[in-house]
Image (cartoon, rainbow, N blue to C red):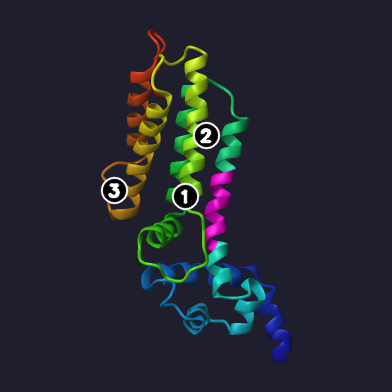
């Protein structure tokens, strides 16, 4: 009977999600290194074999959370590559989607920031620099396209890409670090729009959607 009950628990998707949720909460509140497997399973109301069944280990739980963030970024990049419209429109849409995706997963994003900026916690290596580097490359590619097709002036392409990505990063940190952010989605689009207005070729600036 115990084996049957165990199998029912293991085959329940809600149990897997509960483990992920409790792991995210504990890793964020206590730190990765200070969270034990015992605490994880007790908090989720399961046994160790159930955790091992789904994730293999505490490390596996952590990697699943981080892979979720990585997958979200890859999805946004793919959407950008498939999008049409002006460079301005694509940049605004890209930063909007990044912002919304991060806001919807803010606990996981906070954990990533804590691991990246905080003291070493013995967590499995994640190349967090890839996230920023990938965004910078994609934005830089769009900026170059805008300069080439005459949508933007002959500006310093690297500087414009850094200004855009830096603006997005600063406003995202506001969401992560403050209980009540002073600027949100609309403010992000307004700020990005102002930067693009400054780079726009004469008579090509467009109003924000």
Q: What is the number of callouts on the image?
A: 3
For marks 2 and 3, the one nearer the N-term is 2
Residue at image coords 38%, 61%: 114
Residue 72 in the magenta stretch? The answer is: yes
Label 3 – label 1 distance at C-alpha: 25 Å
Compared across the picture, whether 31 is left or right of 67 comes to left
Which quarter of the rendering shows the N terminus? bottom right
Q: Residue at x 34, y 29 (%)?
A: 190
Task: Establish if 205 lies above or below 53.
Answer: above
Q: Is residue 110 above or below residue 30?
A: above
Position above or below: 159 against 207: below
Q: Is residue 80 left or right of residue 8?
A: left
Per the rendering, the mark at residue 129 is: 1
Q: Secondary structure at mark 2?
A: helix
Which residue is at the far top?
203
Quadrant occupied by the C terminus: top left
Identity of the residue drawn at 57% across and 39% down: 77
């Amino acid at each position: 009977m115990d084996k049957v009950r165990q199998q029912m628990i293991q085959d329940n998707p809600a149990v897997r999600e509960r483990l992920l949720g409790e792991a995210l909460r504990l890793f964020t509140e206590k730190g990765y290194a200070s969270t034990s497997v015992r605490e994880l399973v007790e908090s989720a109301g399961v046994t160790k074999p159930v955790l091992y069944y789904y994730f293999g280990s505490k490390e596996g739980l952590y990697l699943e959370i981080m892979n979720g963030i990585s997958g979200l970024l890859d999805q946004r990049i793919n959407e950008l590559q498939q999008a049409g419209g002006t460079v301005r429109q694509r940049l605004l849409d890209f930063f909007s989607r990044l912002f919304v995706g991060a806001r919807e997963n803010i606990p996981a994003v906070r954990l990533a920031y804590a691991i990246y900026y905080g003291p070493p916690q013995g967590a499995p290596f994640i190349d967090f620099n890839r996230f920023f580097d990938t965004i910078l490359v994609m934005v830089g590619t769009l900026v170059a396209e805008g300069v080439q097709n005459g949508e933007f002036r002959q500006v310093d392409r690297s500087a414009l890409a850094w200004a855009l990505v830096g603006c997005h990063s600063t406003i995202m940190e506001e969401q992560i670090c403050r209980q009540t952010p002073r600027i949100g989605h609309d403010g992000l689009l307004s700020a990005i729009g102002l930067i693009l207005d400054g780079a726009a070729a004469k008579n090509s600036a467009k109003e924000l959607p």
